[in-house]
């Protein structure tokens, strides 16, 4: 039997907490249902790797720890590690349920790996932190906070660096697990950012873009298809204008032109497009940006923005 | 080359947070140093599996979530999953540092697995919860709390069931990873308790004893040595009396006699002794209870209480 092709699916935060929701455990499990059913079906034909965001979950934990003076506060990389455990468990248990719906006995194995990602201490991101995280503060609340803050519409907010991912530390472990036909859940929230230098190891207070980290991983494991699934149908040009146009199958060269024109905003579609382009360039394989409901269709080429080399 | 023997080491909570400490990230990393240096050295001769407790970390997260009404509260099994991520990351990064101290390049791989453990919904533990967890409450604070509470010296405290572990769900994944010579960190806090029945899967609000869960895992992976390392030198008989005697190498039959005499208290030494006895009985291999500083000595037979079949 030929080896199954590998797909890496990177889930946006809305796979667990949708816009306007508080993020109760029930909501998160409910939201995962449809997506995990698709994953269970796809696993019949594909080897699957799942990565995911963690923004709302990190925000909630930060808010909780700031509300409580009795307990020592944990640095951001440890909060990130916590959300990898939390979301990994929620995805695994939802997958388990999805498999039980379609199969007599669950013979598919899956595993959640705590993942860390090496970043460069000279990354320009550390000089100029831009990534807002966690709760909003009033001027009064913000006094004395040990964070760098930025002004937003809703108040002051902490900003941290978002350095580029350099390497996924657990890449060999992940490859081995894929070879063994396990569904691997990893690289949650873009991975825990660490610096390794002069035989020293340390976690850093930063957030890695999960789409860029997923792209690096997709390249490392030589994924056949790399899917970024969130709440948007795909990338569009002339966004919000009368000639707005959703992109479907688009060659890399054409996409590069749109990027130069500034078609994709930095905070949202920009990193998704960049992640998929890097992947397509490095591997020559298919990369797709699609909506969560459309993952199966995106894989058969019927939905989403596909960037091809 | 002959295969390396396998050791499973189950760390007590004090490997990370010592009695009297608040549990800052710095304290936890500092406490892990000595233990992880021992693990790095032992890995030259042994395949290593690490399990660990999570009591103080769960307590801190529960306290934080109760201090904050803005964020939905997570059920206990999700808090457990968070601590698996947190502690797994702390152990991995401490191991990484320990390896860099002794080796030019770190060629040892290690991996943290989110682990869940099946329990029996008819376990008598669910009828009569006995395991106290989380913060202490005054009578006033306790009003309206949706928990079952118990009276303690320091106030009221939540109690949950502590059902017996039946099977480690990820046992096959863990075995594969050991075969591949990875150091595996798993089964944190005794594992996330789940019930699988009639093709349904659900997490439960309970806490599994980490020594008993580790024993099941040690049996599954056919560990050559099972070590329970905490803040006590070993098991003693006639505890606190003039003829108190620390047990060293002790045959199973003799140990069974002491258990019947009620020599080991239910909350602390009891489960450790039971865990090691179950292991020795099932495998005929060596099981040792020792102090964290003494792991290397315990393995060479120079420290701890060793129970032999």
Image: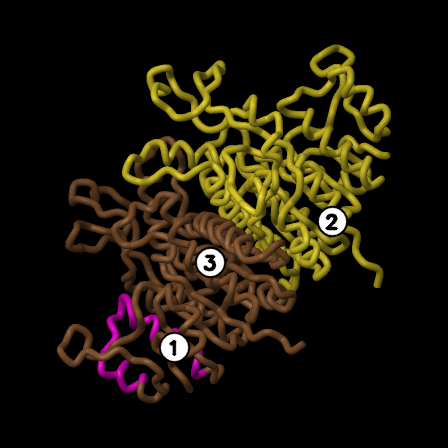
Chain colours: A brown, B yellow
Residue A194 seen from this side: no
In the picture of the structure, the residue carrying the numbered disc 3 is: A36
**Residue at left offset 46%, top offset 22%:** B148
Q: Secondary structure at mark 2?
A: loop
For the residues labelled 1 and 2, say whether their Cβ atoms are less than 8 Å apart.
Answer: no
Distance between the alpha carbons at the discs numbered 1 and 2: 45 Å
Q: Nearer the viewer, residue A235 or B263?
A: A235
Q: What secondary structure is the magenta-colored segment mainly?
A: helix
Instruction: Report crowding for label 3: few under 14, some 14 to 19, many 20 or more residues within 10 A (C-alpha).
Output: many
- Between disc 3 and disc 1, whose residue precedes? 3
Chain to which mark 3 belongs: A
Query: Do marks 3 and 2 share a subunit?
Result: no
**Is A118 in the magenta?**
no
Distance between the alpha carbons at the discs numbered 3 and 1: 19 Å
**Residue at left offset 50%, top offset 34%:** B205
Q: Secondary structure at mark 1?
A: loop
Chain to which mark 2 belongs: B
Across and down, in percent, residue B204 comes to: 51, 36
Disc sitting over residue B221 in the figure: 2
In the picture of the structure, the residue carrying the numbered disc 1 is: A302
**Residue interval drawn in magenta:** A255-281
């Amino acid at each position: 039997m030929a080896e199954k092709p590998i797909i890496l699916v990177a889930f946006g935060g809305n796979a667990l907490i949708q816009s306007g929701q508080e993020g109760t455990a029930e909501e998160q499990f409910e939201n995962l249902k449809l997506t995990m059913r698709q994953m269970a079906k796809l696993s019949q034909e594909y080897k699957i790797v799942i990565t995911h965001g963690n923004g709302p979950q990190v925000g909630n934990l930060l808010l909780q720890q700031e509300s409580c003076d009795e307990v020592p506060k944990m640095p951001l990389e440890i909060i990130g590690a916590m959300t990898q455990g939390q979301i990994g468990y929620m995805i695994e248990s939802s997958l388990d349920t999805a498999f039980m719906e379609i199969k007599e006995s669950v013979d598919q194995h899956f595993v959640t790996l705590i993942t860390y990602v090496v970043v460069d201490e000279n990354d320009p991101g550390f000089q100029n932190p831009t990534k807002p995280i966690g709760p909003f503060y009033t001027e009064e609340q913000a006094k004395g906070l040990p964070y760098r803050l930025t002004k937003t519409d809703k108040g002051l907010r902490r900003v941290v660096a978002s350095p580029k991912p350099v390497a996924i530390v657990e890449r060999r472990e992940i490859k081995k697990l894929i070879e063994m036909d396990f569904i691997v859940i990893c690289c949650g929230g873009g991975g825990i950012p660490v610096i390794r230098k002069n035989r020293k190891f340390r976690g850093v207070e930063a957030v890695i873009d999960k789409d860029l980290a997923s792209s690096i991983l997709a390249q490392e494991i030589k994924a056949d298809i790399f899917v970024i699934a969130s709440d948007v149908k795909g990338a569009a040009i002339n966004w919000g204008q009368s000639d707005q146009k959703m992109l479907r199958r688009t060659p890399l060269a054409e996409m590069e032109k749109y990027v130069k024109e500034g078609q994709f905003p930095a905070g949202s579609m920009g990193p998704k497009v960049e992640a998929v382009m890097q992947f397509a360039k490095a591997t020559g394989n298919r990369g797709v940006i699609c909506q969560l409901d459309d993952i199966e269709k995106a894989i058969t080429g019927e939905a989403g923005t596909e960037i091809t080399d």
